[in-house]
Amino acid sequence: MENQLGQLSKAIAFLAEFRKLDSEMQMQTALIFLLIAKDEGCSVRDLEQLTGLTSASCSRNVAALSDVGRKGNPGHNLVAVKVDADDRRQRNLFLTTKGRAVLASALEGFRNAD
């Protein structure tokens, strides 16, 4: 039981980093961020297949994580969207410098949690 509590503390510390960024961030937005961090260069279509979310939902979450969010509002600037050189219809997703810093901070919180 004590080990489970320790693991929960680590998960809470990890998620707290996202709350610092945006106290109302949706869980699926954080999930999309982590999937992009795990597989940089992936596409929105890849995210659809991994999560089971619709194309619209994945695009909306990617927009929230990019520099320009929904309806032209500022995004979090954690993810950069780049046009694929071989297929200009495809957009590949990468972490920005800020995205890498947020990931590093979240992982540090995870490692240091009791």
Image (tube, helix red, strand yellow):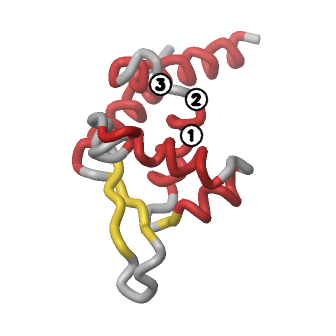
Q: Please, what secondary structure does the residue beneath circle 2 have?
A: helix
Can you give x and y, in whole percent of width and height, for residue 20 in the image? Answer: 35, 18
For this orientation, the residue located farthest to the left is 97
Q: Are marks 2 and 3 in contact (CB under 8 Å)?
A: yes
Can you give x and y, in whole percent of width and height, for residue 108 in the image? Answer: 37, 31
For this orientation, the residue located farthest to the right is 1
Q: Residues within 10 Å of mark 3 (few under 14, many from 20)?
A: some
- Could you tell me the amino acid type at mark 3? Met
- Count how many numbered circles sit on residues in the image: 3
Can you identify the residue that label 2 sits on? 27
- Could you tell me the amino acid type at mark 1? Leu
Label annotation for residue 48: none
Can you identify the residue that label 1 sits on? 31
Q: Is residue 27 above or below residue 16?
A: below
Among the 4 quarters of the image, the one containing residue 73: top left
Alpha-carbon span between mark 2 and mark 3: 6 Å
Answer whether residue 94 is visible to the viewer in this image.
yes
Q: Closest to the observer: 43 or 73? A: 73
Q: Please, what secondary structure does the residue beneath circle 1 have?
A: helix
Q: Are marks 3 and 1 in contact (CB under 8 Å)?
A: no
Q: Is residue 94 above or below residue 66?
A: below
Name the residue: 41% across, 46% down: 63
Which label lies toward us, 3 or 1?
Answer: 3
Left or right of 95 in this view: 45: right
Can you give x and y, in whole percent of width and height, for residue 38 in the image? Answer: 50, 55
Left or right of 49 in this view: 24: left
Name the residue: 68% across, 50% down: 54
Can you identify the residue that label 3 sits on? 25
Q: Are marks 2 and 1 in contact (CB under 8 Å)?
A: yes
Answer whether residue 99 is visible to the viewer in this image.
no
Q: Please, what secondary structure does the residue beneath circle 3 have?
A: loop
